[in-house]
Image: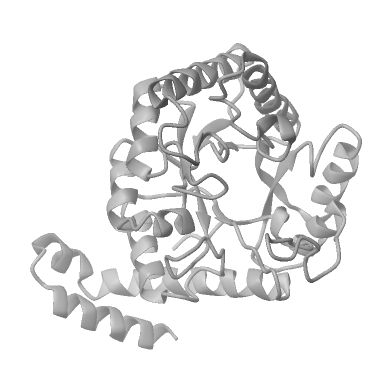
Amino acid sequence: MAELKIAMGIWGNTNLADRFNVDGFGDFVPVLDRIKQVGEIEGIDGFELHLPTEINESNADDVERVANDYGLQMVQLCGHTWTERQYKFGALADSDPKVRANAVARVKAALDMGVRFNVPISVLWPATDGNDFPLQVDYVALYDRYVDSVRRILEHIHRNSYTTKLCIEPKPFEPRSWIMMGTTAQALCIVNEVDDPSFGMNLDVGHSLIARENIEDQLSLICRYDRLYHTHFNDNDQQCDADQPPGTVNFIRLVSIMYVLDQHGYDGWYGLDLFPYRDDPVKFMEISRDNLRLAKRVVGLLNEKGARDLRAAGTYGPEMAVLMRDCIRAVS
């Protein structure tokens, strides 16, 4: 089986604030040191970040130097369109044309910077496009404006012959009470409506979990349309987007996800979106790497032991449960 390509989102290995402790529990770690920390961990070969908060024209040369020093690939670079006052009520779908134009320009700037690093993925997270109160926004207009903004960004991609794939990352809530396209299927509807090979999906496991989705189902649906371009791995107990290491809350669920990805021949990156508010981020990354590798070995053994036939029949629930248990024991 091919080695996993794992990348870390460097927003997670620094001091992290939350709404109850805006100062966080640790110390701020400079961007270059975060990249170096990722590079020092065996088996993590890529990193993800945002423009302009983590990379911009002032530090791009240094980021490139450090990435080259550690043999790291910049896997995903997106424009930050939810961290400034202008975006408090929306970004790509905001009712103010000036705010929308600024958000589109920010995404384009990230794409332009990404070309320098051969970045394969740029994520769109709607974040502040949504509502907090009933009937606060006109969702018909919201979708119209969002699709128009996406088309403008895709025009930029094609006009410049960029190979970077643009991906929607759905999430049901937080920071808004309701974020537009909050479920996998909703986001996939927009992807299919736009119908552009440069536009697809990034499935964040934690986001799907808090939406109470069956991730096996959702991944299969995305892959049915060949629109799975990226993944973000983490874990939670489905109460909040805790961004714990994948497989630490439910390892069987992780195996199930990895099985579906293997079934569909997914060969993209396995991004880590982790938030170690109180813990050592190195431990979070190492646990994530080890759990992903372990789950992949379980998947291989499941197939050796007949899982494909059991699943094809669809009637062997207890037998599949026992096989899963025995394969996990065997590779542990």
Which residue is found at the position 20% from the left and 64% from the top? Answer: 308
Question: Is residue 99 shown above or below 239?
Answer: above
Q: Residue at x 35, y 37 (%)?
A: 186
Horizontally, residue 211 falls left or right of residue 130, namely left
The quadrant in which the C terminus is found is bottom left
Question: What residue sits 67% from the left and 15% below the top?
Answer: 98
Query: Is residue 195 visible in the rendered structure shown here?
Result: no
The chosen color scheme is one colour
**Number of numbered discs present?**
0
Residue in the picture at 84% in, 45% down: 63
Side of 56 where 94 appears, left or right: left
- Choose between 98 and 66: the one closer to the eye: 98
Residue 244, image quadrant: bottom right
Q: Position of residue 112 (x, y in %)?
A: 72, 25
The quadrant in which the N terminus is found is bottom left
What x and y, as percent, mark residue 47?
69, 51
Question: Which is nearer the eye, 248 or 314?
Answer: 248
Position of residue 221 in the picture relative to residue 55 (left or right): left
Residue 286: x %, y % from top left: 64, 73
Residue 76 visible in image: yes
Return the x and y of residue 272 as percentages of the image width and height: 59, 58
